[in-house]
Image: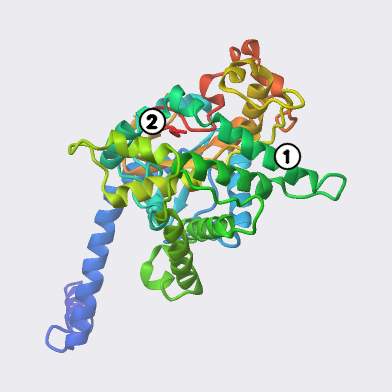
Amino acid sequence: MGETISSYIKFYTSVILKPYSWTVFELLSVALLSTFFVWYIQFLWSRRKLYKCAKKMEGPLALPLIGCALYFIGSPYDIYCNIMTMFNKYPKIFRVWFGPRLFCAVSEPKYFEILLPNFLRKEHLYHHAECVVGYGLFTAPLDIWKRHRKIIMPTFNQKILDSFVDIFSQQANVLVEQLKTYSGKEEFDVFHVVYKCTLDIICETAMGVKVNTQTTDFPYPKWVDRIFEIVFLRIFVFWYHFDSIFNFTPLAKETTDLLKNLHEFSGVVNTKKKAFLDYLIELTSDENSKFTEQELREEVDTFIIAEKVYDELIEILGPDRSVEPADLPKLSYMDRFLKETLRLFPVAPFIVRAIDEDVDLGDHIIPADTSVVFGILKAHTDEEYWPEPFKFDPDRFLPEEVAKRHPCAYVPFSYGSRNCIG
């Protein structure tokens, strides 16, 4: 037995350890592998809460290193369809690994009520939109958002909004004339027609500038659509997260050209009547709350681009009279019609927030250092709250019907203090 043990020791020291014959390369390789192994064990141990949380949730297949990234390849439409398929397959709550990062996706209103008012920090992936709107309200870090929101909020008072009703009416009349050209013809995409109307309204009310996109071939809507397609791809295509890769793609050059056009447009302000921008400048004249020129441009960019709601209603007030502010409270059916439109076409089908501390949802624990995806469109079409969810029925918003539902079953502009200011 002693001879056997002795032979093992000799073999181990002479063949495996080779203490006097290892090359520098072999020593470095072993050192690097050992260091990586120790780091990896520590990395896994530090994330044990994430793995414990993920194990308790359903979710799509996650591969080593890339997680579920293969589900987010293709056109923006393909990616969107894959995301909605996940929400339909794993209702209420599920997990998605995006590379090494854990995302918890929720579509249950009770989760919205707990999370949205208490976690206001946007997910880091939103920074890919900063190239378009800078640190406007949509993308701003929490400290900047709080300051800007406090400054901007007074401009959204009823008196100022009432002063814009005449512009709404004029542009709506132009929209009616544009829609007449499609009457009796084949099916068409109404979004692009309505979006041009919305852009005309927001430019004239926010900046006092008439751009006449409804009656001319002004390319701004195309620029906006394309730049946000690229932003969408940068967010969801994993390898586009790295500037060193993205900057060598044709999309990078296209992004530069589009941003030049967009920023040149928003920088040319020729105000002929008092507009949103004037009110904003007046409110920020104090040195302690003054916006810089760049901050003003970023907020203007945000308001121009974010205004993409479906305003398909043609309300006839009479053969000649235009809409007046006093008419608005009387239009109860129009109000329900718009709400039902936004139920099926919310401003964003999903939004993402960062989670900074452990959250107890009652039936699940979401650990700190994760992010939550809120499936707004899924909540808006959940049969538990919306019978025949894809049937268009404005009477879902009659007061007695609204009283039956959870308040977060309908959140087209998000919920809590970081909801859409518009």
Residue pictured at 27% horizontal, 37% vertical? 284
Which amino acid type corresponds to the residue marked 2 in the rendered image?
Thr
Secondary structure state at the residue bearing disc 2: helix
Residue pictured at 63% horizontal, 37% vertical? 170
Q: CA distance from mark 1 to mark 2?
A: 29 Å
Q: Is residue 285 above or below residue 294?
A: above
Residue 199 lies, in percent from the top left, at 56, 46
356 lies left or right of 352? left
Which amino acid type corresponds to the residue marked 1 in the rendered image?
Val
In the picture, residue 88 is in which quadrant? top right
Secondary structure state at the residue bearing disc 1: helix
The number of numbered badges drawn on the structure is 2
Q: Which residue is mark 1?
A: 176
Residue 367 visible somewhere in the drawing: no
Q: Which residue is mark 2?
A: 155
Q: Residue furthest front?
A: 272
Q: Are marks 1 and 2 in contact (CB under 8 Å)?
A: no
